[in-house]
């Protein structure tokens, strides 16, 4: 078979995969996320995975404010990618050499639902595109709902419901302000930092998030998801 034929088949396969991912993304407007590559990877590693989809209305508003305060205070303002945050991160890297993440909650959702962990420009580019796509087609509320359902809180606990039961023995709707801040404090590295027992960093970050949650509520930074 000619090389040109192989190349053409590869191109058609790639295009088919792209179309399939976007059709899948549109289907997720109406149905829960069935699982993610990250969950599959944890199973392969021998970790028990705990995951059940929980409706937005069954998740404590405290946790919604906590993840906005901890991860993306401009969540309601950007279109899935925060260009201002990216520029700031690039400037800081040029000036100090320090690498600071600039991924939005929407980008993290896109990565968790459609992609895989790890770096690389190809994955980051796909992540940015899918973040813009789901921000436009899903809307902020659905993005937040998906994020809170597929985020890992360590030990194979995926989603707010599993995390709430696993860490505090209660459903996600009953999380207190402090408990929500403590859960948000270990993001985005829940297998590095622990909720129980919480170390000095997590305890300090919890207090910082609690203060930021008040700002989120006061300034309406959660208005796009909480009426």
Image (cartoon, grey):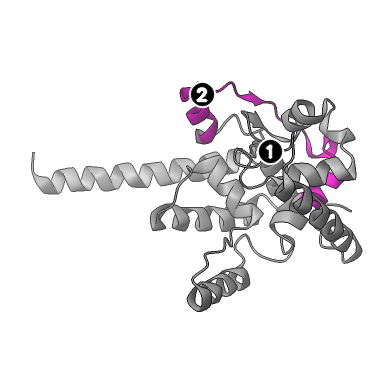
Q: Is 87 above or below relative to 197?
A: below
Closest to the observer, 168 or 111:
168
Most extreme residue toward the front is 200
What percent of the width, then of the height, locates residue 219? 87, 66
Q: Is 53 drawn above or below residue 224 in the view shown? A: above
**Circle on res. 6:** none
* SS class, disc 1: loop
Badge 2 vs badge 1, beta-carbon distance below 8 Å: no
**Nearer to us in this view, 55 or 20:** 55
Residue 61 picture location, percent across and down:
86, 45
Horizontal and vertical percent position of residue 71: 69, 55
Quarter placement of the N terminus: top left
x 63%, y 37%: residue: 152
Spatial separation of the CA atoms under disc 2 and disc 1? 20 Å
Q: Nearer the viewer, mark 2 or mark 1?
A: 1
Question: Badge 2: how crowded within 10 Å, few (<14), some, or many (20+)?
Answer: few
Instruction: Report the residue that reaches farthest toward the left.
Output: 2
Q: Residue 222 location in percent, x, y?
A: 82, 57
Q: Is residue 130 left or right of residue 173?
A: left
Circle 2 — which element?
A: helix
Q: Which span of residues is magenta-colored? A: 38-66
At 57% from the left and 55% from the top, the residue drawn is: 131
Q: Is residue 99 highlighted in magenta?
A: no
State the residue position of label 1.
Answer: 194
Residue at screen point 72% across, 66% down: 77
For marks 2 and 1 on the same chain, the one whose residue lies earlier in the sequence: 2
Q: Mark 2 sits on what residue?
A: 43
Task: Assess whether residue 61 is covered by the magenta stretch.
Answer: yes
110 or 42: nearer the viewer: 42
Residue at point 70% right, 53% down? Answer: 139
**In the figure, 168 relative to 178: above or below?**
above
Crowding at dot 1, Cα within 10 Å, few <14 / some 14-19 / many 20+, comes out as many
């Amino acid at each position: 078979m000619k090389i040109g034929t192989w190349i053409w088949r590869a191109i058609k396969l790639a295009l088919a995969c792209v179309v399939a991912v976007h059709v899948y993304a549109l289907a997720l407007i109406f149905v829960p996320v069935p699982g993610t590559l990250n969950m599959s990877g944890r199973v392969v590693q021998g970790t028990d995975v705990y995951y059940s989809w929980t409706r937005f209305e069954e998740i404590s508003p405290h946790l919604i404010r906590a993840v906005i305060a901890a991860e993306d205070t401009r969540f309601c303002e950007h279109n899935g990618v925060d260009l201002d945050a990216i520029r700031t991160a690039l400037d800081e890297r040029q000036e100090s050499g320090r690498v600071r993440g600039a991924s939005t909650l929407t980008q993290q959702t896109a990565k968790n639902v459609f992609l895989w962990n790890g770096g690389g420009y190809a994955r980051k580019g796909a992540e940015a595109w899918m973040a813009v796509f789901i921000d436009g087609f899903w809307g902020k509320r659905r993005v937040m709902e998906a994020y809170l359902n597929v985020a890992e809180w360590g030990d194979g606990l995926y989603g707010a419901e599993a995390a709430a039961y696993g860490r505090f023995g209660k459903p996600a709707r009953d999380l207190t302000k402090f408990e929500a801040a403590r859960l948000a404090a270990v993001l985005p590295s829940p297998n590095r930092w622990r909720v129980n027992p919480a170390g000095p960093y997590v305890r300090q970050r919890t207090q910082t998030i609690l203060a930021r949650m008040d700002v989120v509520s006061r300034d309406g930074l959660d208005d796009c998801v909480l009426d």
